[in-house]
Structures are given as C-alpha cells and as structure tokens.
C-alpha cells in the first residue's frame, strides 16, 4: 500500500489536472483555422530548436577538434620565401628558430600541384587542419608565424623556394613608422567603410566597385606583410579564404586584374608561404585564359571570369600595347609554381609576336595593337606614358626574372632605350631639366605623364644588373625632373601630366600645368624610382625627397575619418578639391615603396633576389638550375 502523497506533491497534481482541463476547454473554443495556425507555429518552433541544437553541437565538436589538433602541434621548419627582412642578432633566442644562412638564387622546380574540388583534395584538408592549428597559437609572434608557414608548405607538398630563410622584421626607423601610421590610417578607413569592396570613397565614407573582388585588400596583402602588420594581414587572409570567390558573372580588365589580383596573390604566397594564395592565384589565372583566344593570339583586354567570354572594349577591337605586354611576369611565375605551362606559353607568344611587328621606331612601339590582325594601329604616335609605359619596363624585368638568359628581351630593351634618347629626350628652361616627351607623326610634344616617372627606377635597375653606366646617368637626371614635378607645385604634389617650358621667357618654372591635368591620384611612380635610386646609389637626398612627398600626402590628401583621397588641384593648397577616391595602388604601391625607400637594409626585398611587377608586387628571380 502506497503512502499518502506529500502536500506539495498533491498540490502539483491538482494544478496540472486543472491546467489540462482549462487548455482542453480553450482548444475546443478555437476555430479550425486558429487550430491550424497554432499547430503550424509549434512545428516551426520545433524545427528552429532542432537546428540550434545541431549548430551548438557542431561548435563544441569543432572546439574539441581544434584543441586536440593544438595538442598535437609540433615545431616546423621556416617557410621557403619569408618576409625578407633583417634577422635578429641572435635568431636562436627568437621563437626557437635555429640560425640559418640565407641562400640566394636557389632554383626550385615547379611542383606538381593540381587544383581539385575541396571535398576531394586531401592536401586541401591537410592545409585546413594546419590553418586551424595556426589559429590556436594566437599571439605567438612572428617566430611562431614562421613555423606555421613552413608547416603549410610541407603539408601542401610543395618543394623549397628561392629564399629559404625566415627573417624577423627589423626595427623600424622614425620615417618607416610614419609610413606604417599612414597605412593604418588608410586601412582603417577601408576596413570601416569599404571592407571587401574594391575601393574606398573616404569623403562619403562608402565604396566603389570595379570588379567586385576586394581589389584594395588583395593589392595590400604583401604591403601588410612587409610592414609587419600581422593582425591586419591575418584578418585580410581570412577574408580571402572565406569570401574571395571568382565564379561570378563580371568582366575584368586583363591587365589591371593580372597586375593587381594575380600579382598580389602570388606575392602574398611567396612572402607568407601560405598555399591558400597560390590556389587562389591558379584559379584566377585559369579564368583569365579565355582572353588569349583570338585570331592573332594578342589577347582581348576584357574577360568575364564567370562565363569565360572574352572581348575587346565596346568602342574598339584594339588592345593597348601596355595591356598585352605587361602580364608576362605574373603568368610566367604562375606556370613555374604550378607546373602548368599554358600560362607562360600564352604570355610569351604575345612577346614574340610584338617583337616581330612592323611599325616600331628604333625600338619604340605605338600605343595600340589590333586583336584580329595582330598589327600595330595608330602608327606614328609614341609615348612612354599611358598605354605604352610598362611595355618597356617588362622587357627588362622579364630578362631579370628569367636569370638574364633571354637575349631577345635584352636586345629589345636596349634598342628602346636608344630610341628614347634619340627621339623623346629634351631639356627644359630655365633649369635644364631632362624630360621624356611624346612624338606624334614626327612632331615633338613637351608633354610628360607622371606615369613616365617609372623610367628612372627601371634604368637604374638595368644599370645595377650590368647594363651601360650611361643608363644610370640618365636615371639620375630624370629623377631630378620627376622630383621637380612635385617641388614646383604649391601643394608639393605632382600633377597627372606636366608640360615643360622649352623657351627662354620670364617664366620661372620649368613645369607648366593645364587645367585638365592638375589632379593627383596618389600615384606611386616617383617614389618607386626614388626607392631604386636610393637603394642603388646610397644618396640620402632621395630619402629626403620621399619624406617631403609623404608630408604633402598627409597635408593635402589625408581624410580625418580614415583613408586618403585623390585631389583635383595640386596648385591650390587652400582648396585642393578632394575627389573622394582612394586607388588600390596607394596601399599596394605608393606606401610600400615609401617604406622600402626609408629602409637602410639592402636585404629587405633585395634587388638581386626579387623583381617587382608594375603594381609593386615582388616576385622571385629565377636562379640558374
């Protein structure tokens, strides 16, 4: 016989009976429609509850797996191509790294790397596990970062790279710290108002899209690595891993996307040792290949990376010569790393065809080339500015990249420099500044784009690699001119285009500016050449000139809420008229070259080990086999 129930228990039983009776009464009072709605809501609530339970269970499972992986983590060798900066005096004391002498020009064979679907690729899964282990380590410092990056290389099955020593960032001097401050200010604006988009509009605190591929973020990856901004780099890396997808219906410009996106990913891979960037680079390179499917093998300037349809611009069947001849560094390097020769073969076929074309003038090339016939168009017009500039740059840099073996590239470059000296050089009044003009059907124009200021650096680089000493003399003379394009403006910033005075008049300035040319887009070419000239001569005046330019950028283009803006009038310091746009190359090139200019360490991206593409992304020089 059961004992009588306790008072509390008896009360609970009575309440439950009463509540059940009340619920049944209310349920009967509802209409059929109301009953169906109540049942539907109950089912929805049950489904949400089940989904939340599964999600929480997965989270705890992932935490447990990461903890287990962290427990299994072991030290790894340094990565093959690290941030190339000066090592600490006692590397054994930093993060447990053993001393290792940098090896230059160590030839690596192209790995047999195939891109497969993530679910079926064991290398991808191993890479993901390595990344999860890396995330567990957290704030372990650059030494531990080196160990993780080396682990990524080994687990991906890649062989060694040309520069196997991981070097810790050297202490930054005050001028370099000022560049880091400028970068962080620009990055803060991008991160807050334009994260994941192509370009920041700093005044309206918004963004603009060009390709919709996070252009500024990718362009700045290697800059962050070089400046030692680990936190920002890792955050950007996470975006690339999670958000960067190329399977989208969008037209991209072959040249611009190659130098900024493909070049940026390849450089980030080389500096960090992270296989993620190489896989993204190969995916993107494959999507650019339809551009080469033309009757002449001269690529179209536009390609849809989602549909694979390539085409010329709507208004012409021509491509510009600079567009089709300034993609070779990147495509050649992509072939070397992946073992797939199609990238290199397509790009080098363009070089061979341009080499054999008629219409040149002592090595100078016209600005346009037809994708159907493969011939130059608009004959008789020659410039080293827009539409032709980087053709000359890539002749030299391909020769350097390939280990100085490709004689035809060197001969074309040397012939072009002679053509420049013969047809395009002139001197201004009153300061006798040497400048590079333009030729239009035999008529000389004293017009020089700021873009031409890449030339002093290129000439100096050639002289460093054994070309005639007179190239260095011309480089120094042109460097003075490019500096005066800044110095003679009221804001200390160069216009987009300068016109030089050729006559003895009362005009005191050599540099004249037309109203349509007074804008400054935060371009890098002058500070790029200052970097080369300082690195190769040791003359500190080039550092001082760069310091003046950085000061002018901070004074007239820095936006308080974050970011820097191009301006419309370099001659009006009171009203420079900001244009509300920060080009991706300001982070990818301008600030990077300023940081390198202010460094006194010749091993920081040594010019004997790296060659920079035209977007300032360093790629390794191929060492002899």
Image: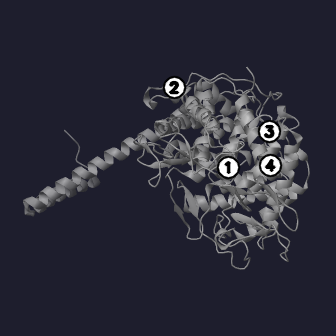
Give the labeled residue for mark 1. 389
On residue 607, the disc is 3
Is mark 1 in CB contact (under 8 Å) with mark 4?
no
- Which quarter of the rendering shows the N terminus? top left
Mark 4 neighbour density, 10 Å: few (under 14) some (14–19) many (20 or more): few
Cβ–Cβ under 8 Å for marks 3 and 1:
no
Q: Earlier in the sequence, mark 3 or mark 1?
A: 1
- Element type at mark 3: loop
Mark 4 and mark 3: Cα distance apart in space: 25 Å
Q: x and y percent of residue 492 in the render?
A: 78, 68
Q: Position of residue 569 (x, y in %)?
A: 68, 73
Task: Give the number of the mark in front: 3 or 1.
Answer: 1
> Label 1's element?
helix
Residue located farthest toward the front when viewing the structure as drawn: 442
Disc 1 residue crowd, few under 14, some 14–19, many 20+, Cα 10 Å: many
Residue 333 tag number: none
C-alpha separation, residue under disc 1 versus residue under disc 4: 15 Å
Q: Residues within 10 Å of mark 3 (few under 14, many from 20)?
A: many
Q: Which residue lies at the image location 53% right of the left edge and 26% below the top edge?
A: 123
Q: Position of residue 483 (x, y in %)?
A: 82, 61
The answer to whether residue 41 is left or right of residue 100 is left
Which mark's residue is nearer the viewer, 2 or 3? 3
Q: Which residue is mark 2?
A: 114
Q: Which circle, 1 or 4, is nearer the viewer?
A: 4
Q: Which residue is mark 4?
A: 421
Q: Position of residue 106 (x, y in %)?
A: 75, 24
Residue at left offset 53%, top offset 37%:
285
As helix, strand or loop, the secondary structure at mark 2 comes to: loop
């Amino acid at each position: 016989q059961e004992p009588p129930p306790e008072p509390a228990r008896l009360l609970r039983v009575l309440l439950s009976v009463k509540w059940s009776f009340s619920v049944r009464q209310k349920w009967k009072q509802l209409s059929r429609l109301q009953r169906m709605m109540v049942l539907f809501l109950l089912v929805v609530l049950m489904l949400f509850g089940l989904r939340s339970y599964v999600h929480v269970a997965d989270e705890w499972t992932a935490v447990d797996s990461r903890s287990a992986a962290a427990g299994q983590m072991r030290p790894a060798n340094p990565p093959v191509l690290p941030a190339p900066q000066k090592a600490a005096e006692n590397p054994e004391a930093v993060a447990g790294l053993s001393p290792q002498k940098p090896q230059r020009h160590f030839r690596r064979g192209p790995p047999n790397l195939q891109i497969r679907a993530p679910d079926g690729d064991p290398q991808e899964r191993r890479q993901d596990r390595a990344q999860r282990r890396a995330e567990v380590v957290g704030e372990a410092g650059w030494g531990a970062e080196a160990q993780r990056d080396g682990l990524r290389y080994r687990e991906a099955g890649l062989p060694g790279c040309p520069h196997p020593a991981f070097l810790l960032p050297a202490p930054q001097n005050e001028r370099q710290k000022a560049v880091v401050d400028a970068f962080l200010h620009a990055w803060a604006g991008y991160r807050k108002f334009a994260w994941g988009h192509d370009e920041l509009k700093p005044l309206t605190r918004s963004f603009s899209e060009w390709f919709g591929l996070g252009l500024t973020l990718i362009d700045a990856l290697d800059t962050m690595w070089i400046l030692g901004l680990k936190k920002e780099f890792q955050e950007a890396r996470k975006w690339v891993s999670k958000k960067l997808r190329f399977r989208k219906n969008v037209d991209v410009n072959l040249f611009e996307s190659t130098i900024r996106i493909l070049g940026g990913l390849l450089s980030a891979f080389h500096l960090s040792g992270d296989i993620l960037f190489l896989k993204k680079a190969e995916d993107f390179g494959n999507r650019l290949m339809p551009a080469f499917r033309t009757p002449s093998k001269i690529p179209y300037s536009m390609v849809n990376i989602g549909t694979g349809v390539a085409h010329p611009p709507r208004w012409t069947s021509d491509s510009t010569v600079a567009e089709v001849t300034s993609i070779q560094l990147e495509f050649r390097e992509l072939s070397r790393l992946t073992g797939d020769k199609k990238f290199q073969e397509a790009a080098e076929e363009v070089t061979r065809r341009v080499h054999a074309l008629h219409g040149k003038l002592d090595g100078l090339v016209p600005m346009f080339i037809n994708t159907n016939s493969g011939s130059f168009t608009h004959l008789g017009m020659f410039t080293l500015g827009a539409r032709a500039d980087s053709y000359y740059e890539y002749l030299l840099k391909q020769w350097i990249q390939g280990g100085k073996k490709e004689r035809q590239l060197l001969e074309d470059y040397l012939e072009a420099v002679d053509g420049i000296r013969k047809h395009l050089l002139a001197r201004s009044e009153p300061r006798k500044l040497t400048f590079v003009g333009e030729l239009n059907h035999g008529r000389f124009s004293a017009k020089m784009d700021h873009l031409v200021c890449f030339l002093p650096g290129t000439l100096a680089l050639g002289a460093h690699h054994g070309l005639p000493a007179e190239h260095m003399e011309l480089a120094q003379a042109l460097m003075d001119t490019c500096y005066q394009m800044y110095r003679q403006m009221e804001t200390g910033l160069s216009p987009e285009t300068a016109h030089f005075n050729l006559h003895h008049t009362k005009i005191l300035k050599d540099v004249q500016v037309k109203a349509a040319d007074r804008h400054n887009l935060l371009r890098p070419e002058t500070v790029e050449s200052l970097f080369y000239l300082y690195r190769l001569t040791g003359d500190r005046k080039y550092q001082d000139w760069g310091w003046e330019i950085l000061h002018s950028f901070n004074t007239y283009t820095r936006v308080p809420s974050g970011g820097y803006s191009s301006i419309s009038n370099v001659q009006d310091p009171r009203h420079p008229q900001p244009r509300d746009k920060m080009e991706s190359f300001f982070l990818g090139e301008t600030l990077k070259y300023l940081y390198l200019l202010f460094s006194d360490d010749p091993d920081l991206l040594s010019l004997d080990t790296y060659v920079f593409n035209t977007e300032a992304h360093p790629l390794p020089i191929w060492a002899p086999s």
